[in-house]
Amino acid sequence: MKLRFVAAAVVLAVALAGCAAQGPAFQRAEGPPNSAVIYVYRPYSFFGSLIHPVVECDGQSAAIEPGAYHAFVVPAGHTGCRAGTESEDEVEIDADPRVHYLRERISWGWLVGRPHLDPMDQDQAQAEIQSCCVQQP
Amino acid sequence: MSKASQPVRARRRLALAAAFFAAVLCSGCSVQQPAIAGPKQADAHPLPFKGRLIGGDPGELPPAVAMSLSRDSQITFSYREELTHDEHHAPMLLSAIDPLTYAGYPMGEYGVTASASLLISDGDRVIGDYTASSRIEKPYSLLSEPTHRELDEAARAAVRDAIDRKLYNDAGRLAESVAGTE
């Protein structure tokens, strides 16, 4: 009985560990002058971990796994990011040449989890993004 | 009434009831993205003087200021706007097991606070300094979900309207101040 419990716990631990993104730790992205960097990061959460909605920012796109981030380097100016499954979230960014942070989060949906892109302030985002690794293509 | 028509009627009633329940269920399935109503806006009209924009985006101004721009005025406008976001979310496990979630009870809430400041100067002399802030809060649920963009736009519109109201209330003094320098 005990052996079965231990085996189940090991299988569960392996399964959960397998859901988190693997890759190099956070590294600051550099863009050309007069560009802005938009970091979209997704802290690890078991809920919705199998869903990887495509995030689009200024014509670029990336599907971000739980525990990963992607740095979008975009020309300075008005731009926007969006992600959607059965509903869509959209954020408008006044991308003056500096760094912006969006945290991707999956909430419940009727059939599939819904992505949310929460604009974050720099202090909180910098602390949270350290635990995320670079999203591998 | 014939005995043969009774089962037909019963079947018809059953079909109607099923259709009604299906309609109720399906109406709950579509995610509504409601228009976010801000406060009633002041009727925008130009200020009694023109000014030159030296700070801020010409496309992102309170309407009264946008209507009063001139490239060659000695009066200057400097406008700045900032948004701060916050949100809270119910724990996902609790939302999942709460039957109210599926009836449209909020799973969390988004908040946006817009802060704005407008400085009106005549050369080195400040003739008007206005600040305002506004807050928009909106819950989200399985049935209704605002986007961050909609919230931001509502918060921006509200804070611009607040600046406009302050300007209109102070328009007489501003006009006198500008006239005194011309």
Image (spheres, rainbow, N blue to C red):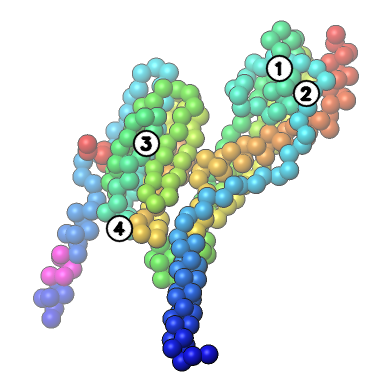
Q: Do labels 4 and 1 share a chain?
A: no
Question: How many labels sit on residues?
Answer: 4
In this rendering, position of residue B165 left or right of residue A120 = right
Residue at image coords 13%, 81%: A1
Q: What element carries label 2?
A: loop
Query: Is the stretch drawn in magenta largely helix, strand or loop?
Result: helix
Question: Which residue is label 1 attached to?
Answer: B69
**C-alpha gap between disc 4 and disc 2:** 54 Å
- Kind of residue sitting beneath label 2: Pro
Q: Is mark 1 on a helix, strand or loop?
A: loop
Q: Residue A56 carries which label?
A: 3
Q: Mark 4 lies on which chain?
A: A
Mark 3 neighbour density, 10 Å: few (under 14) some (14–19) many (20 or more):
some
- Kind of residue sitting beneath label 4: Phe
Mark 1 neighbour density, 10 Å: few (under 14) some (14–19) many (20 or more):
many
- Kind of residue sitting beneath label 3: Glu
Question: Which residue is label 4 attached to?
Answer: A46
Q: Which of marks 4 and 3 is nearer the N terminus?
A: 4
**Residue extent of the magenta highlight:** A7-11
Q: Position of residue B147 (x, y in %)?
A: 50, 45
Mark 4 neighbour density, 10 Å: few (under 14) some (14–19) many (20 or more):
few
In this rendering, position of residue B158 left or right of residue B21 = right
In this rendered view, identify the residue nearer to me: B13 or A84.
B13
Residue at image coords 67%, 44%: B38
Residue at image coords 75%, 10%: B74
Question: Which residue is label 2 attached to?
Answer: B46
**C-alpha gap between disc 1 and disc 3:** 36 Å
